[in-house]
Image (tube, rainbow, N blue to C red):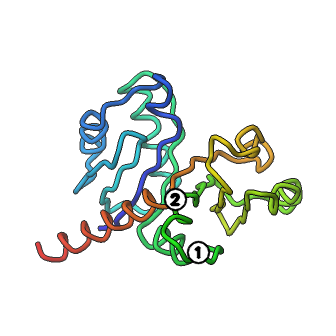
Amino acid sequence: MNTYIALLKGINVGGNKIIKMQALKAMFESLGYDRVRTYIQSGNVVFESGETGSALLADTIRAKIIETFGFDASVLIRTLEELEAVIAGNPFELFEEEEYKRLYVSFLEKEPSAQALEQLRPYADGADKLRVVGREMYTLYEVSVSKSPLFKVPLEKLLGTSITARNWNTVNKLAALGRSEQETAART
């Protein structure tokens, strides 16, 4: 079995696309996935499946969301190994706990083109810092997301791919949940 993390985009935000986590968990289980666990209300699901291929999993989950809840939501999938690499690949040297509260990872559906990365360059080294590594974009905010000038920049449009962001704490919690799932599975 492989451990995956599904990151749903735009659910339970501003009273739109509401999905209760218990219902989301049940939906994943109805697809035959094992050891399904959700984390906070923003659409994070850790699960196991014998299937391989993140794109196929994302398409299956997305179709089931439409069927079950009546609306579309982008689904980005990472394996536990990929999520661990995201954590290890943090390009920012941070020394204080407080700095990590300003670090976010945006998960991209696909790796951006060279042209898209060039369009992002003017935003890379302002007060807020951006670094794209493969299919992830790390953002270190000077103050916070909501006070950032990047908040109004159409990053998804510039990069030409679907994006969903998680704070550093959430990324690490999802990896920890995935690790605990693997440890539990190994004991059974």
Residue 129 on image: x %, y %: 73, 62
Image quarter of residue 90: bottom right
Q: Looking at this view, is 39 or 63 the one in front?
A: 39
Q: Looking at this view, is 165 or 46 the one in front?
A: 165
Q: CA distance from mark 2 to mark 1?
A: 10 Å
State the residue position of label 2.
Answer: 101
Give me the residue at 41% from left, 57% from top. 5
State the residue position of label 1.
Answer: 94
Q: Quadrant of the N terminus?
A: bottom left
Image quarter of residue 127: bottom right
Q: Which element is circle 1 on?
A: loop
Give me the residue at 47% from left, 49% from top. 7
Residue 86 on image: x %, y %: 54, 70
* Mark 1: few/some/many CA within 10 Å (<14, 14-19, 20+): few
Q: Pick whichever of labels 2 and 1 is earlier in the sequence.
A: 1
Identify residue type, mark 2. Answer: Lys
